[in-house]
Amino acid sequence: MFKNRKDAGEKLANALEKYRPEKPVILAIPRGGVEVGLQVSAKLNTDFSLIIARKLPFPDNPEAGFGAIAENGSTFMFENAHYWLAGETIERIKQQQVAEIERRVNALRGGRPLPEIAGKTVILIDDGIAMGSTMRAAIELCKNRKAGKIVVAVPVAGREVAEEIQKKVDELIVLEIPEPFRAVAQAYERWYDVSDEEVLDLLRDKIRKKELKDHEIHGFEI
């Protein structure tokens, strides 16, 4: 469906063109959402930043999670989390992810705070939604920061999680909902895990080429 994250971002930008007059703030979830979000920001000529949220992984199966936590402490947990794990285990995992969030804020955003979003249209972007826990934690952060409008935009998602997230935001835009949905990677010809250095290279590259000319790149030091 998509050649790569750049291709997905370009197609998502076309679907978001109607938001250009609102001068939205684009908040991308690293690492995979960064290249997608940069394409949207470039096309809409609007502000861009990174929003840090981390999955809360099961101790014996780190690929799966029971929730997520965002950089301001906003937390989403599935209803059965306290049946699956003891309270002290949940707290320990949360603290581990808080430490990783702090590392990512420093490494990827230079330790700078999120831009002001109160009263503004915010577009939350990732390269896709699987379980949706990190996106839901990011939504809670935006609600706590009094965003004027919250839009979630992704290239691909499963139908069930899309329907759940749609209830939490002003608008959800998903380009592809595969049937059956197995993983975000199934929608991409080229899929790989993105590193911190690639995120920084993407930001440096866009600035050097002036593709983000006249944009405000919050929290990134050239």
Image: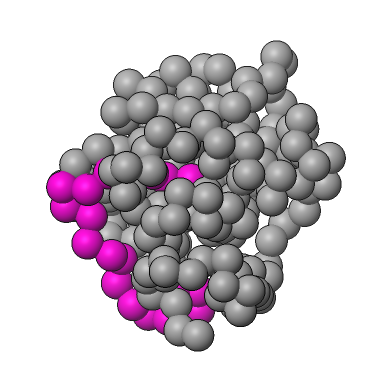
Image quarter of the N terminus: top right
Q: Is residue 114 magenta?
A: yes
* Residue 196 shows in the view: no
Q: Position of residue 81 (x, y in %)?
A: 40, 35
Q: Which residues are magenta?
A: 106-125
Q: Residue at x 36, y 27 (%)?
A: 171
72 or 114, which lies in front? 114
Q: Position of residue 47 (x, y in %)?
A: 38, 60
49 or 69, which lies in front? 49
For residue 58, above or below residue 180: below
Q: Residue at x 48, y 28 (%)?
A: 173
For residue 28, above or below residue 8: below
Q: Residue at x 44, y 77 (%)?
A: 220
Q: Residue furthest bottom?
A: 222
For residue 53, above or below residue 156: below
For residue 191, above or below residue 101: above
